[in-house]
Amino acid sequence: MKKFLILAALVLAASTAAQKVSAQKVQIGARVGITSQDMELKTSDFTTDSKLGWHLAAVARLRLVGFGSGALGAGLFLQPEIVYSQNNYKMHSQGILNMPPIVPKTRADHSGETSKIRMQTIDIPLLLSAKVSIVRVQAGPVFNLMNNYSSVDGSLELLPTRPAVGYALGASVDIGLLTIDGRYHGEFKELKNNIKGGGSTYESVKGSLSSWSLGVGVMF
């Protein structure tokens, strides 16, 4: 009898949880789009030029509070995502003429060198999304899981230490199953970059990283 009551309680709890999840209308989907990422190095010795990149995301939406339905509905949502992005940079060396006299003795001069650098990242945004009619606004922290830089062409290498947590702000428009999403991604802390070239290393070069993205997705 006791086992039966425990089993009945578990079944009832599972049924209640399933009803709640159903009522909250969990949606899943995917998004693909372009990314414009800007890296600024706080040094006169190196500059970077960024090109348009791309991103691919898996998206979930969990409705926390909802009013109405369809185009007239409103609500508050929890929106976790997994985002893979790829961006390319050209890094230019301006030389070391402006550095203190003691520094050039330990570093080679890389004036005029240009390298193509590819950046691949995996981020997990955990956003709070508010919806009114077909418009959504969202904001929240972004957790960085992977940050891989590789030199595609050239002798300069960029080895940055990216902060583990950044942030995202954005807005989107829902048209049926289709969603159009625009977003800004920034960092709370400065990056510290190590730059290698010709056997020399420029350590802890400070910089900032930010990006804009525009994507089109589908939610079910």
Image (cartoon, rainbow, N blue to C red):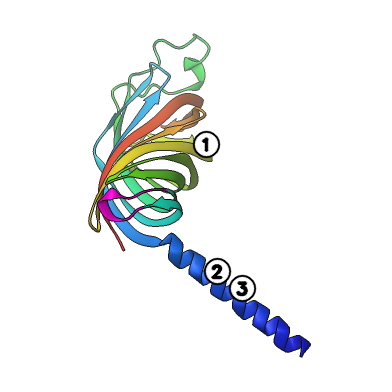
Q: Earlier in the sequence, mark 1 or mark 3?
A: 3
Q: Is residue 124 above or below residue 88?
A: below
**Secondary element at tag 3:** helix
Q: Is residue 161 above or below residue 60?
A: above
Tell whether label 2 touches label 3 (CB within 8 Å): yes
Q: CA distance from mark 3 to mark 2?
A: 6 Å
| Viewport quadrant of the N terminus | bottom right
Q: CA distance from mark 1 to mark 2?
A: 37 Å
Quick one: label 3, few (<14), some, or many (20+) residues within 10 Å? Answer: few
Of residues 143 and 88, which is closer to you in this image? Answer: 143
Q: Which residue is mark 2?
A: 17
Query: Image check: 80 left or right of 29?
Result: right
Q: Position of residue 110 (x, y in %)?
A: 36, 24
Q: Which residue is mark 1?
A: 163
Q: Position of residue 160 (x, y in %)?
A: 47, 35
- Tell me which segment is drawn in magenta: 68-75
Of residues 59 and 220, which is closer to you in this image? Answer: 220
| Viewport quadrant of the C terminus | bottom left
